[in-house]
Amino acid sequence: MSPPHITCREFQDFVVDYCERHLSEAQRAVFQQHLADCPMCRVHFETYLKTIELGRRVLAGADPDAPAELPEELVEAVLAGRAAGRADGS
Amino acid sequence: MSAITPAEQGTLPEPDLVAGLRQGDPICASTFVRTYGGPMLSVARRMLRHEEDARDCVQEAMIQALRQIDGFEGRAALRTWLHRIVVNRALMRLRSRASRAEESLDELMPQFDETGHLIGPTEMPAVSIEDLIEQNDVRRLVRAAIDRLPDGMRTIVLLRDVEGYGTEEVAGMLGISTGAAKVRLHRARNALRKLLEPVLLGRAR
């Protein structure tokens, strides 16, 4: 027996839980059946996954416009703040 | 002249570094700040989008971490523990900012016809992530797209998809239910997807 039919709008409600592997086996079958049947949702879902991957990889990489090291004055400020905390016991 | 110590080289094993921090060793403190400060500043910049705020956030977080090192139980890596302190500090700053009027993102959400069918392309070119990542323009577009998201949406995408926290954990950080976090995450990803659609479909000029 094939899984029950859902609309594209209903399909959207399953996307996050599918990605998080939180769907039951029956729900997953419904999701995958819609994906197999609907070219629009297939493109949408594929670009959705690529968006996550692209965002993760670009943002986790170095920002070309910002120095990767902590500026020296900030290093000094942190160490001074730590020392002040030790002196006053906080 | 004495030899450079592992602490000074930044090659001290983590348990030894933590022990040094607990004893108040200034070289270990300096190593800790120099080793983790840069990556933590990147985290704060992503979340706050404001250099001065990001620097203040990291300064506060690292001082807090150094003062509370006795509370570090070693269940997670030192970097993970510090990361969470930085994120919490950044979230506090975001909450305290005057909320600006957020533009409606409805036009970036999936559009359906009257029968509930998705309106959109039915095929896509085989553009690999690797090829996209290589392009400076694409990297710039991705950063600009994420910056266009309102704070609430940008934050959830960053915490879940970039910083790698679980959805339930993110919900706890933001003080919302897991269900609400999933809805917000899905809307944020959909908005980003729409903004990046020309790139993903190979139509960016």
Image (spheres, rainbow, N blue to C red):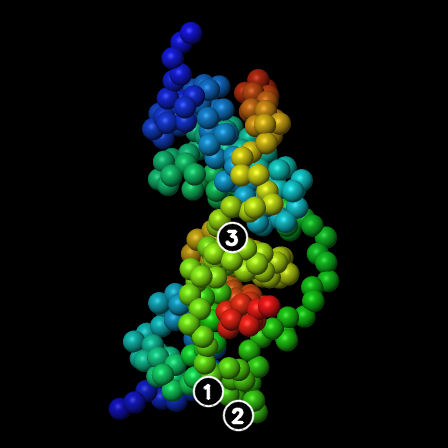
Identify the residue at image location x=62%, y=38%: B55
Q: Pick whichever of labels 1 and 3 is earlier in the sequence.
A: 1
Give the residue pinned by disc 2. Answer: B115
Disc 3 residue crowd, few under 14, some 14–19, many 20+, Cα 10 Å: many
- Give the structural element (helix, strand or loop) at label 1: loop
Mark 1 vs mark 3: give the one in front: 3
Chain of the residue under the numbered disc 3 shown in the image? A
Distance CA(mark 2)–CA(mark 1): 8 Å
Q: Are marks 1 and 3 on the same chain?
A: yes
At label 2, the amino acid type is: Thr
Mark 3 vs mark 2: give the one in front: 3
The front one of B117 and B125 is B125
Cβ atoms at labels 3 and 2 below 8 Å apart: no
Disc sitting over residue A7 in the figure: 1
Disc 1 residue crowd, few under 14, some 14–19, many 20+, Cα 10 Å: some
Q: Are marks 2 and 1 on the same chain?
A: no
The front one of A82 and B113 is B113
Distance CA(mark 1)–CA(mark 3): 34 Å
Chain of the residue under the numbered disc 1 shown in the image? A
Q: Which x, y percent locates residue A1?
A: 26, 91
Cβ atoms at labels 2 and 1 below 8 Å apart: yes
- Give the structural element (helix, strand or loop) at label 2: loop
Quarter of the picture containing the N terminus of chain B is top left
Residue B92 shows in the view: no
The answer to which image quadrant residue B18 occupies is: top left
Give the residue pinned by disc 3. Answer: A59
